[in-house]
Image (tube, rainbow, N blue to C red):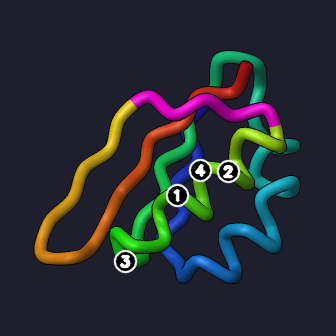
Amino acid sequence: DIVLANINRNILTNDMNKYVDSLRKGGLILMSGFFTTDAQIIEKEANKNGLVLQKTHEREGWAMLEFIKK
């Protein structure tokens, strides 16, 4: 499974559990549409919800994070 989420930090963190619930173990979620300065906040919330960071991409102050469900 792959879930794509391209929205701001507050929506991503508030709805993180919904995204994780829709994934099977080993599923990927790609999150983008937020500033690189928000990446740590999103990663922390993702970790709380059973996601592990796999890759980070940054361009011109914007970030994309790829997580896998444990």
Name the residue that disc number 2 marks: 44
Tag 1 secondary structure: helix
Residue contact at pointers 2 and 4, CB within 8 angstroms: yes
Tag 3 secondary structure: strand
Tag 4 secondary structure: helix
Q: Quadrant of residue 26?
A: top right
Q: In front: mark 1 or mark 3?
A: 1
Report the front residue among 36 and 70: 36
Q: Earlier in the sequence, mark 1 or mark 3?
A: 3
Q: Which residues are magenta?
A: 50-54
In three-dimensional space, the C-alpha distance between marks 3 and 2, rounded to whole angstroms, equals: 15 Å
Based on the picture, tell me whether residue 10 belongs to the magenta stretch. no
User: Circle 1: is it few (<14), some (14-19), or many (20+) Cα within 10 Å?
Assistant: few
Amino acid type of the residue tagged 1 in the rendering? Gln
Q: Principal SS element in the magenta part? A: strand
In three-dimensional space, the C-alpha distance between marks 1 and 3, rounded to whole angstroms, equals: 10 Å
Amino acid type of the residue tagged 3 in the rendering? Phe
Q: In the picture provided, is 61 more to the left or to the right than 65?
A: left
Q: Tell me the residue at 60%/60% (across/down).
A: 42
Tag 2 secondary structure: helix
Amino acid type of the residue tagged 4 in the rendering? Glu
Amino acid type of the residue tagged 2 in the rendering? Lys
Disc sitting over residue 35 in the figure:
3
Disc sitting over residue 40 in the figure:
1
Q: Tell me the residue at 61%/63% (across/down).
A: 41
Name the residue that disc number 4 marks: 43
Residue contact at pointers 4 and 1, CB within 8 angstroms: yes
In three-dimensional space, the C-alpha distance between marks 4 and 3, rounded to whole angstroms, equals: 13 Å
